[in-house]
Each structure stands twice: as structure tokens, then as C-alpha cells.
């Protein structure tokens, strides 16, 4: 009788193990499917990135072909001249915008013209090459704090028309000097708080 019970227990245990192995097989199969799906997703992402990079590479190649064609038609010197002209025009546009901003600041009282340059001044001037030709765009506006210390020391205390020699052998001439107007701090209000109305006692 005891032997039969032992056999029955062993069979029950074996059945349980078989069922557990079946469950593990299902879990493994599900994980395999998930990994396969993730692999497909990653593959699609890589393909999309490669496609975008390929498109960008093709665009760059097209631009190179166009540039080479233009150089072939006009010649390298003419192309370089056109590039330099475009840069100068962009700089001149910035100059006009800066001058308009200065005029507005003068009108609104945010800056005033000054007779002498100081450490806090904003100066405008023209820089020339050793042969005397102006360096494009022919006008520059900078805060004194942004000028190299060597040049700043020479400019402080000087007025319009003063020139300094640059390291390149040219000159920088002061054309305009401005100072920012400091706005006075608002005085704190000293008004006394309103008196409380007298409270009437109830009779």
C-alpha cells in the first residue's frame, strides 16, 4: 500500500514538473518573439537614419556639383569676388541697423554724445589698412570694454578725430563717442498710511 502511495506522489510530482516546463517554454517563446520584434524596430530605425544621411549626402553632392559648375563658368576669381561682395553687403546691412538703433537710443535719451572717450564709452570709428583703404564695412561700433587693453589705454581721454596705429600697420580713427545715460533710482514712497476710522463703542 505504501509503495502505491509513493508511486502516486512521484507521478503527481512529475506531472507538475512537466506542466512547469511547458509554461517555461511558452515564456521563452514569448521573449523570443519580443526580441525579434525589437530587432525589427531597431532595423527600421537604422534604415531610416541611413536614408536621411544618404539624402543629406546627396544634397551636399548636388551643391558641390552646382558650385563647381558656377566656378567653371565664371572662374574661381569671379566667384571669390562675388562671395566677398555678399559678405560686405551683409556687414553694411548690420551697420545700417546699428546706426538706426543708436539714433533711436539718442532720441529716447538712453545714450548721449560725449566729448572724450572713457572706460564706459561706446565708440564708433573706421579702421584702415596700411595703404589707407578702409576695412569693410568702413564703420565699426564697439563698447570700450570690448577693445583690447593696449588700444583702450590709448583711446581713454581722447576725442573725435583721434587716431591710433593698429598692429597690422593701419589706423583706427574715432568718429563718434557715446555714453549710456544712467536712470535715477526711483525714490521710495514716504506717504503715511491712512488713519484707521475710530470705532464707536456700543452702548
Image: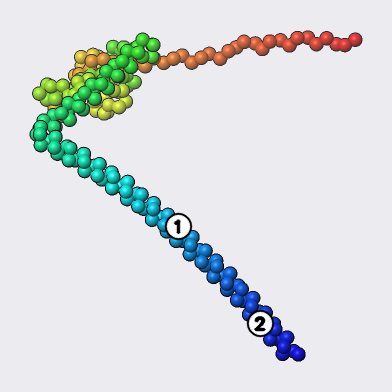
Mark before the other along the chain sequence, 1 or 2 = 2
Q: Quadrant of residue 203?
A: top right
User: In the rendered image, which residue does mark 1 sit on?
Assistant: 38
In front: 61, or 181?
A: 61
Does residue 123 show up?
no
On the question of residue 50 being in view, the answer is yes
Determine crowd level at label 2: few under 14, some 14-19, many 20+ residues with C-alpha closer than 10 A. few
Q: Position of residue 48 (x, y in %)?
A: 36, 49
Query: For residue 120, which quarter of the picture?
Result: top left
Label 1: element kind: helix
Read off the residue under disc 2: 11
Image point (10%, 32%), residue name: 74
Q: Where is residue 8? Give x, y as percent.
A: 70, 84
**Which residue lies most toward the right here?**
203
26 to the left or right of 146: right
Report, in whole angstroms, how far the alpha carbon at label 1 lies from the one at label 2.
41 Å
Q: Nearer the viewer, residue 186 or 137?
A: 137
Which quarter of the figure has residue 36?
bottom left
Q: Nearer the viewer, residue 52 or 182?
A: 52
Locate residue 92, reporting x and y percent: 23, 21
Rendering coords of residue 140 (x, y %)? 24, 21
Between disc 1 and disc 2, the foreground one is 2
Quarter of the N terminus within the rendering: bottom right
Amino acid at each position: 500500500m505504501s509503495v502505491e502511495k509513493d508511486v502516486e506522489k512521484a507521478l503527481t510530482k512529475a506531472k507538475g514538473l512537466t506542466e512547469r516546463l511547458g509554461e517555461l517554454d511558452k515564456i521563452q517563446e514569448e521573449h523570443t518573439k519580443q526580441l525579434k520584434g525589437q530587432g525589427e524596430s531597431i532595423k527600421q530605425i537604422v534604415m531610416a537614419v541611413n536614408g536621411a544621411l544618404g539624402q543629406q549626402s546627396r544634397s551636399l553632392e548636388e551643391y558641390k556639383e552646382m558650385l563647381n559648375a558656377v566656378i567653371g563658368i565664371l572662374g574661381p576669381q569671379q566667384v571669390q569676388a562675388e562671395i566677398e561682395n555678399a559678405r560686405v553687403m551683409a556687414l553694411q546691412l548690420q551697420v545700417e541697423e546699428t546706426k538706426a538703433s543708436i539714433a533711436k537710443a539718442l532720441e529716447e535719451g538712453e545714450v548721449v554724445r560725449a566729448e572724450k572717450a572713457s572706460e564706459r564709452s561706446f565708440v564708433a570709428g573706421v579702421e584702415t589698412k596700411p595703404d589707407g583703404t578702409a576695412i569693410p564695412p568702413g564703420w565699426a561700433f564697439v563698447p570700450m570694454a570690448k577693445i583690447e587693453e593696449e588700444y583702450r589705454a590709448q583711446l581713454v581721454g581722447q576725442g573725435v578725430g583721434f587716431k591710433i596705429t593698429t598692429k597690422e600697420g593701419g589706423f583706427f580713427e574715432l568718429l563718434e563717442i557715446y555714453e549710456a545715460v544712467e536712470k535715477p533710482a526711483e525714490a521710495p514712497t514716504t506717504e503715511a498710511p491712512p488713519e484707521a476710522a475710530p470705532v464707536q463703542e456700543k452702548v
